[in-house]
Image: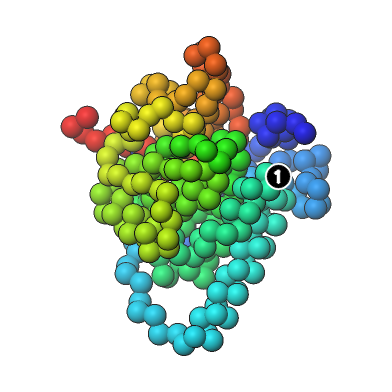
Amino acid sequence: MRDAITRLNAALEGRYPVERELGESGMATVYRPDDQRHECKVGRKLLLAVAVALNASCGPAPPAQANASTLSRQQMDFERARHQMVEEQIEARGVTDPRVLEAMQRVPRHEYVPAEYQARAYSDRPLPIGLDQTISQPYIVALMTELLQPEPDDRLLEIGTGSGYQAAVAAELVSEVYSIEIIPELARSAAERLERLGVSNVFVRAGDGYLGWPEQSPFDGILVTAGAEHIPEPLVEQLKPGARMIIPVGDLSSFQILKVVEKLPGGEVEIRDIIPVRFVPLRRNEQD
Ligand code: SAH
């Protein structure tokens, strides 16, 4: 089987005119192939997409008032929606790693979005999580996880905990995930959420992820889930030889290119471009 990156690069060669779609709660940038040659195996058009900054705030979840049967019906609806999400948004666009697909099927995305967005938790888009930040589009989460080629014994670093969703997906596949979030309120709420949901192998801390987590390094893989202007040197240093970092890099006012940065066994670094994406910016703490 061809390597995921080779396959994606082949599928994505060139032709991605950018098309802007206005969604009901903000904007989403969608990249469409302009011909039919990229049709996937289930015959749907390959539709590649992307994360966006949505200006919305999120309030506290209303108290749960549903009775037991309503709750279980709701859980079944979420389960079905998740199944559809995996088939139509993720598998259909070429993510094939069965472990990644299973993780996307298991992790309850609706638990990671504010109550007012739960009904749209399985839609094909990023959603606001408050404080001007977003939870990434499900396809992008799956793609980044597949590109990392996670192994069960791996210890990963994530920059940009946000809701904790990407960390929870990765945590299904590896032994430990260390995740750094620059906004202390988000770090706290993600840590609480992960604990409530029984995810015990994600360790969250508040801070500037640009600097990595030297005490826990080196890592078997690094996921950066905010758009960077350049590849942070401290993160490259904290990768094990042979390990990969998946990072969106580029102009923060338009879109970035999702890149795979591989530290080769000899220490040299190889960089491959995957697809255009749009993430919220990787910020810096002023005192650092
Ligand atoms: N992975 C998240 C979504 C990330 S949104 C999820 O699954 O929900 C990007 C996040 O990166 C935001 O929460 C933002 O506050 C955070 N961020 C931005 N710059 C950062 C930095 N330098 N260090 C750590 N987190 C950062």
Q: Image check: 234 left or right of 92?
A: left
Residue at the extreme front of the image, as rendered: 153
261 or 10: which is nearer to us?
261
Mark 1 and ligand 1: say if the CB distance to the nearest ligand atom is below 8 Å: no
Residue 216 shows in the view: yes
x 54%, y 55%: residue: 125
Residue 192 percent coordinates (x, y): 33, 59
x 45%, y 85%: residue: 66
90 or 178: which is nearer to us?
178
| Dot 1: element | loop
Residue named by callout 1: 96
Q: Relative to 276, does residue 134 appear above or below in the rendering?
A: below
22 or 118: which is nearer to us?
118
Q: How many labels does the image show?
A: 1
Residue 73 percent coordinates (x, y): 57, 81
Residue 136 shows in the view: no
Residue 213 percent coordinates (x, y): 33, 33
Q: Which amino acid does label 1 sit on?
A: Thr
Q: Quadrant of the N terminus?
A: top right
Residue 122 percent coordinates (x, y): 57, 62
x 43%, y 56%: residue: 199
Q: Relative to 30, does residue 254 appear above or below in the rendering?
A: above
Q: Quadrant of residue 8?
A: top right
Q: Quadrant of the C terminus?
A: top left
x 53%, y 58%: residue: 107
For mark 1, does the 10 Å Cα neighbourhood hold few (<14), some (14 to 19), or many (20 or more) residues?
A: some
Q: Image check: 264 left or right of 233?
A: right
Q: In which quarter of the image is residue 81?
A: bottom right
Q: Image check: 182 left or right of 28?
A: left
